[in-house]
Image (cartoon, grey):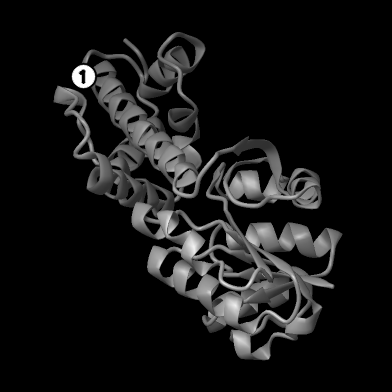
Amino acid sequence: MTTLIIGLGNIGIEVGGRLHERIDADGVDLDVGRREQWLRRTGQEALASLDEVAWTDVERALIIVRSSATAFALAKEIGHRARGTLACHLMTTLDHDDAASISSLEDHGIVRYLEQPVSGGAAGARAGGLTIFTAGPITALDEEFLRSHRATRLFPFAAYGQPTMAKLINNTAAAYHLGVAAWALGVAEDHGIAPSTMHDVLQSSSGASAISALARHMGPDQGELLVKDVGLLAAVAGPPPAIGAGEYAAEDARAAIRSALARGVTSR
């Protein structure tokens, strides 16, 4: 039996690479470049479409793509293609309406749809240290699979849509932390304090946050994903409150922190 990794982007390639080292896992992606990356990483050819999958051998499918609409369409397609019971792990961050509609996919009882957005980024995926929010008919074997290969924390929720809301709220808070940290480093530099020193002060004091600690290692795509998730939450809960002089777009904040720390200004 095999596990499918559908979507070999920034996080999917790390999830898939780790699983391939431990169990039988197949990568699936439309993009030629990503399939080539999978080949370099695993020594195995990735599949170009769901048409190439041997569905009788599939026991799990992990959907890790960027678009909510694409993820939902893939989940529906898996329902049509499944040839035996399998778990479909929806690990894409969905918009709220799609997440709340997952129950509509359960039409024949063959596929267990698990809403499971993740937190921890590519580094967490590479190390098997993700936080996973979950709703749906999870089994003891599902939990063992996740804890053995993917997650350090599992947060169960009672209904579809709740894991997505938890992830969106978390990422909106993270975007705010980034914005405030970027503002703080800018103020510190204006007053002769090295950004690197101020960053260390924040991380050693009550101003610490996980996201600002990671900012110098984040890629632009991670800032863009935060921006996306802030918008998804605002569509459900309304716009978050402004934070005055510290208001930054998440991607601008990520870039500002990296730039400030790279300058290495000496405190005076």
Q: Residue at x 81, y 51 (%)?
A: 141
Q: What element carries label 1?
A: helix
Please state, as top left, top right, bottom left or bottom right, where the C terminus lies in the image. Answer: top left
Q: Position of residue 264 (x, y in %)?
A: 40, 28
**Position of residue 197 in the picture relative to residue 58 (left or right):** left
**Residue 67 shows in the view:** no
The residue sitting at the bottom extreme is: 51
Q: Quadrant of residue 18?
A: bottom right
Q: Is residue 63 above or below residue 50?
A: above
Q: In this view, does 79 lie above or below 106?
A: below
The residue that label 1 is drawn on is 190
Picture mark count: 1
Q: Residue at x 63, y 79 (%)?
A: 36
Q: Residues within 10 Å of mark 1 (few under 14, many from 20)?
A: few
Task: Give 206 or 107, whichever is nearer the viewer.
Answer: 107
Q: Where is residue 183 in the image (x, y as percent from the top left)?
A: 25, 25
**Residue 13 shows in the view:** yes
Please state, as top left, top right, bottom left or bottom right, where the N terminus lies in the image. Answer: bottom right
Q: Residue at x 31, y 23 (%)?
A: 185
The residue sitting at the front extreme is: 108
Task: Give 42 or 235, whichever is nearer the viewer.
Answer: 235
Q: Position of residue 180 (x, y in %)?
A: 29, 25
Q: In this view, does 114 lie above or below 53?
A: above
Q: Where is residue 70 in the image (x, y as percent from the top left)?
A: 43, 72
Q: Which residue is drawn at 62% across and 79% down?
A: 35
Q: Is residue 54 above or below residue 113?
A: below
Q: Which amino acid does label 1 sit on?
A: Asp
